[in-house]
Image: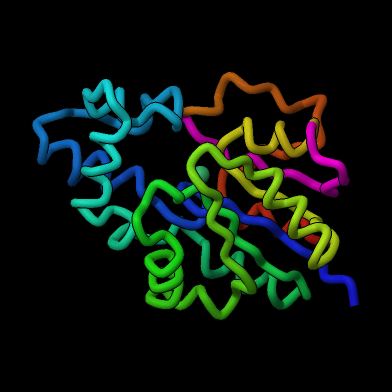
Amino acid sequence: MTRKIIVWDMDEVITNTRDPICNILAPSIGVKTCWQNWKNSQEIYKELGHTNPADSIRLLIEHRIIETCKPENNAYETLKAATELGYTNIIVTARGWHPNPYDVSWAWLKEHNLSQFIYKLVVVPVFGQKFRALESIRFNLGEICLFVEDTYNNLLDTLVLSSFKVKNYALMDRPWNQNVDVRNLPITRIHDLLEIKSLLV
Ligand SMILES: [Mg+2]
């Protein structure tokens, strides 16, 4: 049986780390930042007043941001609906910067009752490319029907560089992807995870 696969990004798609970064981490180091003003999700370290990303990574780890963050609104409902419609949910995350990304992420999914909907969790290493992970999934597991991301470049890389076709792409609307025009691309901009349901027919 060929699986119908949905690939989900983790942070700012399934999780909300932006609120604890602004409300807990930044005040603890005397910085005021508001994610609504973030123009680039890859450069959070600049928002935190750092010149070296390693300083921000150390703080994210020390403050246990990915261990203690909350799920994104409607993550449970959406993953449950996708599962009930027969989709296989796979998370591909770029959390390779964390010393123990797989165990921490899986424990978080279990704690929030989401692991029951997740078939597999893939951690892409630092400087790794997500579309390569998707190629491996496509080759080994089945058809990728949908790829959900908040980082536009990960969608674009897959769209342009991968050797296979993903049926549908969804871009989670965030301040850092506002300058992207997806109208002529097979990418749907969504504002709430529940909108994913309309892409699953
Ligand atoms: Mg993300």
Q: Residue at x 44, y 55 (%)?
A: 15
Q: Quadrant of the C terminus?
A: bottom right
**Residue 185: horizontal and vertical position, in percent?**
80, 30
Please, which residue is most extreme toward the right here? Answer: 1
Q: Is residue 168 magenta?
A: yes
Whether residue 172 sits left or right of residue 82 in the image: it is: left
* Number of marks: 0
Whether residue 91 sits left or right of residue 15 in the image: it is: right
Say above or below: 114 vs 74: below
**Residue 17: horizontal and vertical position, in percent?**
36, 49
- Closer to the camera in the image, 25 or 61: 61
Q: Residue at x 18, y 36 (%)?
A: 26
> Residue 27 sits in which quadrant?
top left
Whether residue 68 sits left or right of residue 118 in the image: it is: left
**Residue 168: horizontal and vertical position, in percent?**
80, 47
> Residue 110 sits in which quadrant?
bottom left
- Closer to the camera in the image, 160 or 175: 160
Say above or below: 15 vs 28: below
Say above or below: 191 vs 156: below
**Residue 39: horizontal and vertical position, in percent?**
44, 22
- What's the magenta region? 161-175
> Residue 116 sits in which quadrant?
bottom right
Whether residue 176 sits left or right of residue 52 in the image: it is: right
Q: Residue at x 35, y 31 (%)?
A: 44
